[in-house]
Image (cartoon, grey):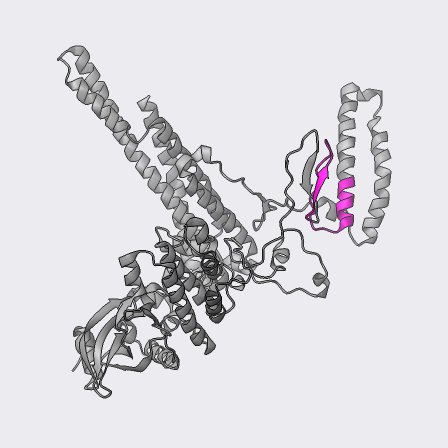
Amino acid sequence: MTSSTEPFDRPLAQRLKEALGEVYTIEGEIGRGGMGVVYRARDERLHRRVAIKVLPPELAFQKEIRERFTREAQTAARLSHPHIVPIHDVGEGAGVVYFVMGLVEGESLGARLKRRGSLPMDEVRRIMKETADALSAAHAVSVIHRDIKPDNILLEGTRGRVMVTDFGIAKALSQVSAATLTGIGVAIGTPQYMSPEQAAGEREIDGRSDLYSLGVVAYQMVSGELPFNAPTVAGILMKQITEPAPVLHEQKAGVPEDLSLSIARCLEKDPENRWPTADALRRGLESRSVGGYRPTLTGVRAAPPRRTGSAAGTARPRPGSTAERRASPPGALAPRSPRPARLAGSLAGGQWTKNERGEWIRAGVGEALPVPDTGEPPIVQKVRAQFARWMAVTGGCFLLNVATGITDGPWFLFVAAGMGFPMLKSYSQLWQSGYSWRDVLNRPPAHDAIQVPGQKGRKAIGPPKQQEYGKHFGKVEQVHRDRQAILGLMTKLPEADRKQLPDDVVQTAEDLYSRALDLARTLNEMDQSFGSDTPERVRQKLDLAQLKDQGEERDRHVRLLEQQLKTALDLADRRDRIAGRLESSVLAMQNMRYDLMRLRTAGVGAVLNDLTSATLQARAISRDVDHMIAAVSEVREAMG
């Protein structure tokens, strides 16, 4: 009896030859990658050279996946365009699934970039334009590529005509469960080229996702490097979601501004701010015009606008709010606020401040700054202001009355009554408007407070200062941004989703943030007082001491230096361990933030295990840090 696994015991080329029969003759292997192996072959019926891509056997083993790949290949086979590699046939047999495609004689854009680094600007423009032309044809029939990268852009012949390949494969993979793909070692898409919506795990994407990926490819063609790099996949995906890409013509001389802005528009985090279609990008490259676009330089993709009723529709958005920003057309320059010559107060001109309408006004010398608009009804804010003044004056008078002798009579009550009578009228208006004292006393959180579920508000911690952390300031900035994002994301989660998450997500983030600051501060202090070259300096002193004439003083000096060298080496080892723990803290915070962002799009069920693991890892790191810092302090004291 033949085993069901027998086909997998033979070489892949042998199985493919059996599946192809006499229709195609395999001539050799062209290359291999994450999506499978590509062979050069000859079509015996039509007497032409073809390329045959064999999908990973681990995927082809499952019937559902075979059917999905076949269906997507049939969809992609409808594409007929001068810049798209045609799919001639798709089939399966002997445990393999294969595509028969047109053979492109040349090299991939990835190979050219590895060989040459960056490319001339005219060549970048041509490759972008031809790739956009291919994407436009595919998007017109609702085919999204989902994995645009240099290895999927082939350059044919001496001219290097663009031929885009692998349409449909990424979509078929995206419909396979993540657990299945992880188990067989196949990745969906390429993190360095993923759009923010792909990185966030959104189920539905459109053609503008391909334009973002093309923007990353174009950025690499111009600069020779990727716009976003990180040591881990989670770090790369986080940067794709949150960090704006540098504007090329501001970073590198000789880059045409229109080409740079065309790439920047592809790389906008919010799809609404990108080129609306691939054809619009192609026409912009041809005309060397970006239609008045200017980079928004925003690092976070805007949330979809909420639908409100008619009553809400008449409300005026607050200055600087998301609603006000999105009222401007995509890519338009935001109106600049008049920037006064002196932002700080002075004897000559007073102080410039911004009122609730977003207008710059000059406040007189000594004049109190206006209280920010809390967004509550005006009558509530008015009565609260009156009540605050009454409390301040009455309280001050009471303290003065006590200091001068309250036994002579509580005269502060006359002040309290005199200021209290006008408040009766205000309370009458408050009551008629449908409000009560509870609304006045229930003060809303400050504008810079972050709401945390189950708490009244958590004060936003100010940005860290570079002088306190030295060369480790970049990592501290990163964990500061991640902490703010985690608290904000937890606030926006529905109550039902929050109940399913670990109870200590917020507290773990706070603890880890505090420990990361301690680690960076300790490292900076060690760098300043200890220095990385201390062991070498002590070793040199020891060598010199050993060259001296024998004697009691020399021996005592050598023993002292040997002890110092041992301590210095120990301290250097501990410093390296602290630096590694700081790196782990940064990555743990990034993982927590990334999993929370995925939760909003992929759902609790898909992310819960990952988020729980990330929280446990962060908690373990926090516990280790205190012991490590305490140990370092002891060694530093021993060093004297």
Q: Is residue 433 left or right of residue 574?
A: right
Q: Quadrant of residue 421?
A: top right
Residue segment shown in magenta: 358-386
Asked if the magenta segment contains residue 207, the reply would be no
Asked if the magenta segment contains residue 365, the reply would be yes
Could you tell me which residue is drawn at 42 percent across and 42 percent down?
A: 474
Could you tell me which residue is drawn at 20 percent across and 19 percent down?
A: 559
Quadrant containing the N terminus is: bottom left
Q: Position of residue 614 (x, y in %)?
A: 40, 52
- Residue at the far bottom in the pictured view: 45
Q: Position of residue 249 (x, y in %)?
A: 45, 52
Quadrant containing the C terminus is: top left
Q: Quadrant of residue 132?
A: bottom left
Q: How many marks?
A: 0
Q: Is residue 93 above or below residue 121?
A: below
> Does residue 592 appear in this view?
yes
Q: Is residue 45 above or below residue 111?
A: below
Q: Is residue 527 left or right of residue 282?
A: left
